[in-house]
Image: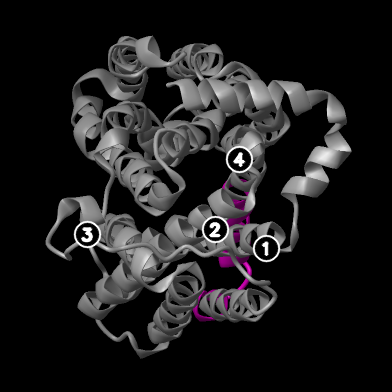
Amino acid sequence: MPDRRIRRQQAANTANVGTWRTLREICNRNFSVVTLINLLVMTAYYLIFVTSTAYARDAFAASLSTAGFTAGIMVIGCLVGRFVTGNLLSIFGCRMVLFAGLLLYVVSMAGFFLVDSLGLLLAQRFWAGVGVGVIGTATGTIVAYVIPQRHHGFGVSLFSMSTALALALGPFLGITLSTRIGYATLMWVNVGIALVCMLIFFGLAALPSMRHRHRSFFSLNSYIDPRVVRFSLVALVVCLSYGCVQAFMTSFAAERALSGPASLFFLLYAVAALATRPLTGRLFDTRGENVIFYPILLLTALSLILLARAESGWMLLLAGLVLGMGFGNFQSVGQAVSLSLVSRSRFAQATTTFFIFFDMGIGLGPYIFGFLVPSVGYGGMYQALAFTVLAALGLYYMLHGRFAG
């Protein structure tokens, strides 16, 4: 990969120009607009995610599994949105696709007020997920184009900090507001957020040309990039663990009488991720991915072991901090690696491919490993996930690490 070595050498040569100059080069107008949109959309997404199950049970007397599916179907919608967006970006350009995604998101949020059955609620959540998938892929692709190539690792890390912050804000606002205001009012808040994002969109300046010769709608190459698939398989395996942390934290904490500390778990996760992502982004630009991936996968496995053994609040919170330093950096560096594997004309497909596998892992994890809970408990499940992440170390080496120069 000689071109990647050249870019890395260029990054090392420019590393001494100073952080502030680098930030000025990265944080241009378009970068700031799409980062703010991503922050707001993902905050609303996680807000809905943590409150959807309880609402479905209260409003429609749904079973626990069916009520949980009202949140899970948003992940499915997100996958669908990501899958179709890669080719659409090549045909219509990022500006038009982002606007269409935001419009769909506004309409789907407002559509909640027409819901009078569980079936309609599932449809509303699905289309909201599609909107999130389209927006997330479009913003991620725009960022890939507007960040100077020599600063891709650092820039993508800064952009993905908005997702880490949303992961802390969304659940916190959802849990806090749901106890103080009605669910209908909460959804009006989401509609307001969607409309604000539409207004922010018009702050975009001229974007680089992103339209390229598109392939057939029936060609898989139009939607994903085969060169990114091998690396993305690692993302799928690693994300199984985070999906289980996200899905079972409330039940796990209640079982161990740790509900109070658990409310701060994702906040500390976000703090650790926000604090370390600029460092890992710089390291990626100057020294490549191997120096980052082996430590963050080990830290992710360690956090799961701590979580499995957590009998006190301090150990649970320590697990959150370690998870933020580990898995909290996986998304940003993983996206940067995916972009480094393709030419600029395939940035949209590379972003789509990585996040399809990323989201698939998060969605499949609770379903696959949830079967272990009745026999080995939550602790046994998290220990099994720790071994799964350690196995992903070997998978990473075989599929990507040994080829990374």
Q: What residue type is labelled 4?
A: Gln
Q: Mark 1 and mark 2 in contact? Answer it, CB < 8 Å.
A: yes
Which of label 2 and label 3 is nearer to you? 2
- Please tell me in which quadrant of the rendered image residue 153 appears: top right
Q: Which of 20 and 71 is in front in this view?
A: 20
Q: Image quadrant for the N terminus?
A: top left
* Residue 328 located within the stretch drawn in magenta: no
351 w.r.t. 338: above or below: below
Label 3 secondary element: helix
Q: Predominant secondary structure in magenta? A: helix
Residue 57 numbered mark, or none: none
Label 2 secondary element: helix
Q: Mark 2 points at which residue?
A: 142
Which of label 2 and label 4 is nearer to you? 4
Judge the density around disc 2: few (<14), some (14-19), many (≥20) Cα neighbours within 10 Å.
Answer: many
Residue 30 numbered mark, or none: 1
Which stretch appears magenta?
166-186
Gap in angstroms between the C-alphas marked 2 and 4: 13 Å
Which of label 1 and label 3 is nearer to you? 1
Q: Mark 2 and mark 4 in contact? Answer it, CB < 8 Å.
A: no
Q: Mark 4 points at which residue?
A: 149
Q: What residue type is labelled 3?
A: Thr
Judge the density around disc 1: few (<14), some (14-19), many (≥20) Cα neighbours within 10 Å.
Answer: many
Q: In this view, does 13 lie to the left or right of 152?
A: right
Label 4 secondary element: helix
Q: Tell me the residue at 63%/26% (across/down).
A: 285
Q: Mark 3 points at which residue?
A: 66
Gap in angstroms between the C-alphas marked 4 and 3: 45 Å
First along the sequence among labels 4 and 3? 3
Residue 83, image x, y percentages: 28, 57
